[in-house]
Amino acid sequence: MVLSKDEILYLIAVVSAAIFLLIFLFVVVVIANVRRRQKAELEKLHALIAAEDNERSRIAKDLHDDLGPLLSGIKLQINLLNGRSGPQQLEEVLNSTSEQLDSAIGNVRYVVRNLMPPGLEKYGLVKSISDFQNLVSKNENIKFEFKHSGIEKRFKGTVELTIFRIIHELINNSIKHSNCSLIKLDLILDDDWLKISYKDDGKSALTGDISPGMGLSNIESRVNLFNGKFKTPLDFSEGADYEIEIRSNKLF
């Protein structure tokens, strides 16, 4: 069958229109994907900014609530050191001032540890958590159990720092607000996921209603940086029970 000139021109026009439509659809899909990736990156950036703002707020509150009163007390003790003080009173003031200075130094070290845990860059996440476990365990009223498996090599530095801060925030909430006597932390890495399981036996753990930096919003912001999953208990009457999952390909 021989096509006429008009039929050939019509066929060429149809094929050209189809090719143009395919190219147009391809460009639309590419633009949509780029915009979706840009939106995802922007959301991550907002989450990072929010997390850092919350971190600064928490540190400021720690300094105000813990270190401020100690320094004020030290100042009052020093004001007692005047010419009218007898030897016994002088000794009592010096002993009291020394104790308060020890507490102030301990609080400063605690805040500094939150900013950049000593040894994290050199020894990694597991060792830093173990060191923090030893620090918490010095409190005779709290037992801290830490288990891990599958973590044979180091994560990226920013990943280790973010995960450490997530875990520290959970522990900080338990110590300060839940009246717990037991903390359990498990880190399990397989081919697909890093699974973080955190539990305590407290009776008044924080919920998402607490102000940013002291509740779960800070933790959730950090988990969102990895597009991870964060599961919280509906009822804190039996203590905290958190599950965090981060895809393995986000860690290295």
Image (tube, helix red, strand yellow):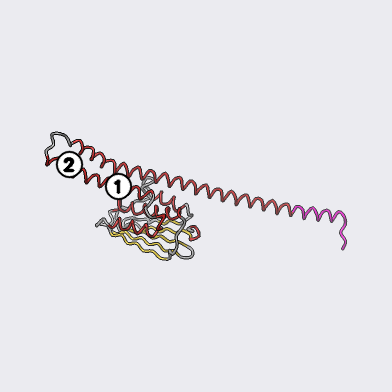
| Residue to which mark 2 is pinned | 93
Query: What secondary structure is marked by label 1?
Result: helix
Q: Nearer the viewer, residue 56 or 102?
A: 102
Dominant secondary structure of the magenta stretch? helix
User: Along the polypeptide, which appears first: circle 2 or circle 1?
Assistant: 2
Foreground residue, 128 or 235? Answer: 128
Q: Which residues are magenta?
A: 1-17
Is residue 100 toward the left or the right of residue 55 in the image?
left
In this figure, which residue is indicated by the disc labeled 1?
107
Residue drawn where x is 23% and y is 44% of the image: 100
Q: Is residue 117 left or right of residue 46?
A: left
What's the amino acid at mark 2? Val
Q: Would you say 4 lies left or right of 135 here? A: right
User: 147 above or below 13?
Assistant: below
Question: Residue 128 shows which numbered tag?
Answer: none
**Residue positioned 38% across, 46% down in the render:** 213
